[in-house]
Amino acid sequence: MEIIHRSLVVAFLCLLPVPAAAVPFTRGDVDQGGRIDVTDAIRILEKLFAGGQGITCDDAADVDDDGSLTVSDPIFLLDSLFRGGPPPSAPFPGCGEDPTADGLSCAAFVACNFTFTFFGQELSGDAVFFVIDKSGGMQDSGELARAKNEVRKVVEAMPDDIRFAVIFFDSGLTRFPDDPEPAVASPETRSSALAFVNQTAGGVGTCGGAALHAALEGARLSEARRNLILYVSDGGGTCMGTDETLYLKTTLEEVTLANSGLARIYTFAVLDVLTVQKAFMKALAERNRGVPLRP
């Protein structure tokens, strides 16, 4: 009888519904475009009042995390964007699971398919382009070695099918893969990329503009929704004898124009940079939907 009883209990438990696995998401990023903007508020309003079906993650649309989708959510979002109101509730600005139990769900959130940490910053994207300065200044106190180690950690953690490229620059540039189109992560491409990083030596000169344009070219070919360009440098622009201030100003304008929202650019100033270099790194990130960071 005891054996029969146990069998009945096991059979009953097998009939119980299995909770769906939690899907990481970013609250407020309703269209999964990599940032919050007025389009996200419009998507919520369309769902509420026009029968819109374009939301695959209701949790992301629950901006105030009250467990329901109401007009208060787009209002909260617009207040945060234009009136200095509080940001969306966690998880924000990175990816994460919903900390609050409620009746909403998240069927899919492709923007959080790959989440990683780079120089202490949590990021997520579908295509990642590392643009690393290997000039003389980056070698004085081991900054290049540190940058290479950060790249290695991310590449090793990449799941299959993530697009990526690694570009080192000094007075010229060298990159993996050789072609403009980014590599697709696999055991083979990860291994090749790690060998490339390990073998890359330091150089002389700082011509970051060409490397940034190469990353943008790869982003155009990636077919990814969330392209990230991670620019690690001392912020300089000592390129072919040109005036540094003019070179950095021109690079900023040309890269921002060429980008036009294609990729988010995060800048990592790994040295105590001068005023003009600091301004360049800050503007490059902020004008390209990224964040300027000082690891």
Image (tube, rainbow, N blue to C red):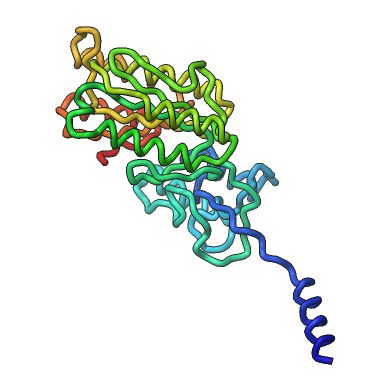
Quadrant in the picture for residue 228: top left
Image quarter in which the C terminus is found: top left
Residue at 26 percent across and 18 percent down: it is: 203
Place of residue 72 in the rendered image (x, y in percent of width and height, measured from the top left) = 51, 55
- Foreground residue among 4 and 130: 4
When the figure is inspected, residue 283 is found, relative to residue 54, above or below; the finding is above
Q: Say which quadrant the N terminus sits in.
A: bottom right
Tell me which residue sits at (57%, 55%) in the image: 59
- The answer to whether any part of residue 288 appears in the image is no
The location of residue 56, given as percent across then percent down, is: 64, 47
Percent position (x, y) of residue 167?
40, 23
**Where is 200 relative to 128, above or below?**
above
Does residue 175 lie above or below 120 as drawn?
A: above
Horizontal relation, residue 76 to residue 47: left or right: left
The answer, for residue 231, to whether it is visible in the render is yes
Residue drawn at (77%, 72%), measured in percent from left and top?
14
- Of residue 129 and residue 49, the one placed in the foreground of this image is 129
